[in-house]
């Protein structure tokens, strides 16, 4: 089989006789739609708790959808007349852009509320029916056609609500409704027309009359669905009004959509219920009553879902409004529209869990590559196209096989056979006449392959095309694999920086080796060439020989010796960066890559460490001080407004950083490195030179005396203080740490640190201990992942007197303090690498939800492999979500990690059998914010022993631990859980 552009085509041959198309979920299925503005939908999807919505709700004003000069341009369509993107609009209910709603969620349907009341458009309905708005209707139809997906159009939604001016004239409403349908249908055949009642108890109370909703019914040929709204589960009229819609739907054989639904009056974040309005319960927003999550669920959600399940013969879609209403102008105080609250299901962990338990059953349809094929004609009975899912690995290594499988989700009986074809040669590789349909590709060479799967039927409407890409990579290098940084609450202790003897002296004093060492390389000769090892790699080789598998903080210097590369002047480093990105130093980068790759060492590689605007951004021959003076005279701080400085090039370093990282990791296939961005302490330097997320695995700073607001002795003057000694750290350092943690969200490491203790002045033990106390406090505050301490007699190595002797073992008092602190559980030291004996574990799973974990590292931890023989539907935790009924590309959870907890939903009982190496002593992450899902904490060789919960948790760090077996509370007298048990998972909360 050739490696160039291989196209595999899977032909599914069918016998179909009907081309009927209506987009209704099959028997016992219901479509879940989320709305009703882009911000609310994004909050739902970005929480990572839930599967992709089966549909997205948006709103459009018919009158404005073709008008760029309208008060709300294009009326929420989000598209200009020439089909390009238009800005969002917001009429007080959150950002609306129907184009973005359609294109941003390609595997979700679209539900549109079409506004056409006469409140601002007198005689609007009559004008619609007379053709005066044909331009707008045709524009809408063309848009729906262009997005090419099932679209549910709620024309004049909530037609019987007294707030919708003009709809009370039934004849005018029906004429306008029918006219819109007549224009849109021929243009956009995938558009379903919905007639939606308001089903509002408030409407009946206000009007003191109950209308006959059939009066608005325009005829069977104009209605594809009937719709209703549901906001007041506890009000007796809510069910009565909804029943009327269902009765009409059954009479006319129409499916029903719950077009709008939310627990009005409830705040799911604060767990409160407040008055909605004076017609129902009192002054809007008053009368706050505290509720538990269970009470809220039982009062609103349980009756709501019970109603849907009871009537699932006709209720085929549900649109939930996942909104913080109180934050939107239309619904916020003084509550002119009544009190709505906060109905975001991701806002509270218990509500989230209950919501997940409901929507994770196979009753609900979510967004997926197969979703549109799972929507069928209604009433049921017509022949429809099958829905399939193609599973293929996205990456494999040379020598491994690529297994391709075709899962038939619906209508397997229509399939005659499946063919796998090499499109490049036209050769039929395999024909499979019976399920499960699969084929295995082997002996693939390096390269990229495209797998295309086509469903071919006798009806052209059923033709579907699925594409998968497979990349065949080189074999993994013989090293310790991908580098990881510690879990929360742990710090790698590393000792630097370049001298073998000082390293061995430290180890001898501690009788304990650090987790790693520190080394320096130079870009211009491609060698690790600083320290007493000369220009070879003796120190690194010593560390590798004695401490295989340890960590190394490796700096690749660009600025320290530019003359070695032929560069000089104020812009020497900038010149070097430009050349690096243009390939001038490829041979030297490759030499460094080869040195990394061959080592049994985990490298943290700093590219151009301690980078600054002064050294790396100045593209001119002007001295940096002259640039500062020039712009200060203009009233501009060039550091804070670097983008305005014409002498600066802010891209050269970024390009060089990413070029080096890409060449090491991708071109040279080095996988035992993490790349570290290490600016100087200036926040402007850090932000303006940041290379981007792709190749920045961690963020680093240096911590010396000035950075810690700690005094130094600079010659004959008194000690110099950069900032008040009572201050925890320099303001720039603090800003950088906060930016790394909160903005770019990268792990933080201390790449260089040492107490500067002048040989004739600040040599007291208290001075050294005071510095260390500050550093350790920051390590705990910012959860620093690695700490390099330079344990060196600087002066003896030729440095200035101000550096002194930072060796902790040079003073017994300092050494005792050091040993007391760094032997605490936070700090990780070197653990000799010893092969682990494989063990086995079995985890029994019952039908329904299970809460599990494993403490075994298996060779292939992919969900597809570990659960290959089991009938599992959903697996999830805070890292992501996996659902077998959605395309693999949309599953954010791919693997099972030892030590973590997972919720697993089984469609039938089964057992997971695992073989691998056991976890070693594991630390349970701290729980700083709310709930967290954890696994069994394996300890050493006690692989299957129960571990007392009290060994880890007490009243100072935990409030409750629970799973399906029971709960545990600190000092609790009725605890039903006492131990962590292997194979089980646990919810914990601080």
Image (cartoon, grey):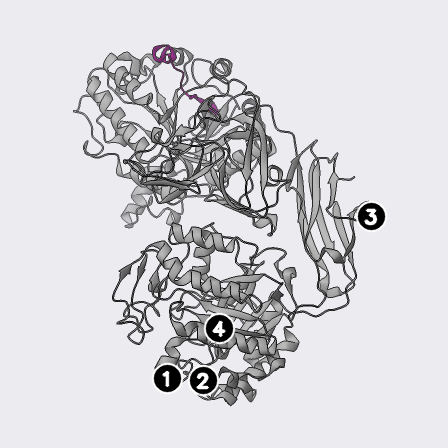
Q: Between marks 1 and 4, how big is the CA–CA gap?
A: 19 Å
Q: Are marks 1 and 3 in contact (CB under 8 Å)?
A: no
Judge whether 37 appears above or below 400 on screen. Answer: below
Secondary structure under tag 1 reads: helix
Q: Nearer the viewer, mark 3 or mark 2?
A: 2
Few, some or many C-alpha atoms within 10 Å of disc 2 (few <14, some 14-19, many ≥20)?
Answer: some
Question: What residue sits right under mark 3 in the picture?
Answer: 426
Image: magenta residue range = 505-522
Of the 4 image quadrants, the one containing the C terminus is: top left
**Rendered image: mark on residue 211:** 2
Tell whether label 1 touches label 2 (CB within 8 Å).
yes
State the mark number for residue 207: 1
The disc placed on residue 249 is none
The CA span between labels 4 and 2 is 14 Å
Q: Is residue 762 in view from this perspective?
A: no
Residue 914 in view in this figure: yes
854 or 332, nearer to the observer: 854
Q: Mark 4 — residue?
A: 228
Image x and y of residue 127, in percent: 51, 88
Helix, strand or loop at label 2? It is: loop
């Amino acid at each position: 089989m050739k490696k160039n552009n291989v196209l595999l085509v899977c032909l599914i041959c069918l016998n179909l006789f009907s081309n009927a198309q209506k987009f209704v979920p099959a028997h016992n299925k219901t479509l879940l739609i989320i709305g009703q503005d882009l911000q609310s939908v994004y909050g739902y999807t970005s929480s990572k708790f839930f599967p992709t919505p089966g549909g997205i709700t948006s709103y459009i004003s018919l009158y404005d959808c073709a008008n760029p000069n309208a008060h709300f341009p294009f009326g929420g369509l989000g598209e200009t007349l020439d089909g390009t993107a238009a800005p969002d609009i917001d009429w007080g209910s959150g950002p609306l852009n129907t184009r973005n709603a359609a294109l941003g969620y390609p595997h979700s349907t679209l539900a549109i509320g079409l506004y056409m009341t006469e409140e601002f458009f007198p005689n609007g309905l009559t004008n619609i029916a007379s053709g005066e708005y044909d331009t707008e209707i045709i524009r809408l139809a063309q848009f729906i056609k262009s997005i090419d997906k099932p679209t549910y159009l709620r024309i004049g939604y909530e037609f019987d609500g007294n707030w919708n001016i003009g709809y009370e004239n039934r004849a005018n409403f029906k004429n306008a409704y029918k006219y819109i349908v007549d224009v849109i249908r021929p243009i956009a055949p995938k558009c379903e027309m919905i007639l939606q009642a308001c089903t509002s108890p408030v409407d009946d109370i206000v009007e003191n009359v109950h209308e006959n909703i059939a009066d608005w019914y325009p005829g069977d040929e104009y209605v594809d669905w009937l719709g209703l709204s549901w906001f007041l589960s506890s009000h007796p009229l809510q069910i009565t009004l909804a029943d009327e819609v269902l009765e009409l739907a059954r009479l006319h054989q129409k499916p029903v959509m719950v077009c709008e639904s939310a627990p009005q009056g409830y705040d799911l974040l604060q767990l409160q219920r407040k008055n909605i309005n004076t017609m129902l319960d009192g002054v809007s927003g008053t009368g706050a009553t505290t509720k538990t999550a269970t009470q809220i669920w039982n009062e609103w959600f349980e009756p709501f879902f019970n109603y849907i399940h009871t009537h699932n013969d006709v209720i085929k879609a549900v649109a939930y409004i996942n909104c913080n209403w109180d934050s939107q102008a239309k619904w916020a105080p003084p509550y002119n529209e009544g009190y709505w609250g906060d109905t975001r299901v991701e806002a509270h962990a218990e509500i989230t869990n209950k919501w997940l338990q409901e929507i994770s059953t196979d009753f609900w349809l979510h967004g997926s590559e197969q979703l549109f094929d799972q929507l069928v004609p209604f009433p049921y009975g017509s022949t429809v196209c099958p829905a399939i899912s193609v599973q293929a690995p996205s990456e494999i290594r040379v020598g491994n096989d690529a297994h391709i499988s075709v899962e038939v989700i619906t209508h397997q009986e229509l399939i005659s056979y499946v063919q796998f074809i090499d499109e490049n040669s036209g050769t039929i590789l395999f024909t499979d006449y019976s399920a499960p349909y699969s084929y295995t590709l082997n002996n693939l060479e390096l390269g990229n392959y495209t797998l295309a799967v086509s469903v071919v039927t006798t009806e052209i409407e059923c033709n579907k095309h699925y594409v998968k890409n497979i990349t065949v990579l080189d074999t993994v290098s013989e090293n310790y694999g991908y580098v990881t940084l510690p879990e929360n609450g742990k710090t790698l202790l590393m000792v630097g920086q370049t001298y073998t003897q000082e390293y061995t002296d430290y180890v001898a004093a501690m009788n304990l080796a650090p987790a790693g060492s520190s080394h320096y390389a130079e870009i211009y000769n491609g060698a690790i060439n600083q320290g007493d090892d000369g220009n070879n790699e003796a120190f690194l080789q010593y560390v590798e020989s004695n401490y295989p598998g340890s960590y190394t903080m490796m700096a690749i210097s660009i600025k320290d010796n530019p003359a070695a590369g032929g560069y000089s002047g104020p812009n020497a480093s900038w010149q070097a960066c430009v050349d690096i990105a243009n390939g001038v130093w490829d041979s030297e980068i490759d030499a460094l890559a080869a040195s990394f790759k061959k080592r049994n060492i985990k490298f943290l590689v700093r590219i151009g460490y301690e980078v600054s605007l002064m050294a790396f951004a100045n593209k001119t021959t002007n001295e940096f001080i002259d640039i500062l003076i020039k712009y200060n005279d203009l009233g501009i701080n060039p550091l804070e407004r670097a983008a305005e400085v014409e002498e600066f090039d802010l891209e050269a370093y970024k390009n060089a950083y990413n070029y080096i990282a890409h060449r090491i990791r991708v071109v040279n296939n080095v996988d035992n490195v993490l790349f570290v961005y290490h600016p100087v302490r200036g926040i402007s330097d850090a932000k303006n030179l940041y290379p981007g997320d792709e190749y920045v695995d961690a963020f680093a700073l240096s911590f010396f005396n000035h950075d810690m607001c700690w005094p130094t002795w600079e010659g004959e003057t008194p000690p110099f203080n950069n900032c008040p000694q009572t201050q925890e750290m320099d303001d720039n350092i603090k800003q950088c740490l906060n930016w790394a943690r909160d903005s770019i969200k990268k792990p933080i490491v201390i790449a260089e640190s040492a107490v500067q203790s002048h040989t004739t002045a600040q040599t007291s033990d208290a001075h050294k201990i005071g510095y260390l106390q500050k550093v350790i406090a920051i390590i705990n505050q910012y959860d620093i992942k690695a700490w390099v301490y330079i344990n060196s007699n600087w002066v003896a190595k030729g440095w200035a007197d101000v550096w002194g002797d930072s060796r902790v073992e040079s003073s017994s008092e300092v050494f005792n303090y050091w040993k007391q602190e760094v032997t605490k559980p936070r700090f990780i030291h070197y653990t000799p690498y010893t092969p682990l004996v494989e063990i086995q574990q079995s985890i029994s799973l019952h039908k329904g939800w299970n809460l599990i974990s494993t403490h075994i590292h298996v060779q292939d931890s992919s969900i597809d492999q570990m659960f290959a023989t089991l009938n599992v539907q959903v697996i999830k935790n805070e890292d992501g979500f996996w659902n077998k009924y959605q395309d693999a590309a949309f599953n954010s959870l791919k693997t099972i990690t030892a030590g973590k907890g997972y919720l697993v939903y089984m469609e039938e009982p089964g057992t997971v059998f695992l073989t691998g190496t056991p976890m070693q002593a594991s630390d349970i992450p701290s729980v700083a914010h709310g709930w967290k899902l954890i696994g069994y904490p394996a300890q050493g060789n006690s692989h299957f022993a129960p571990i007392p919960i009290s060994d880890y948790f007490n009243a100072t760090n935990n409030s409750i631990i629970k799973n399906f077996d029971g709960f545990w509370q600190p000092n609790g007298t009725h605890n039903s859980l006492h131990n962590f048990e292997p194979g089980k998972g646990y919810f914990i909360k601080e």
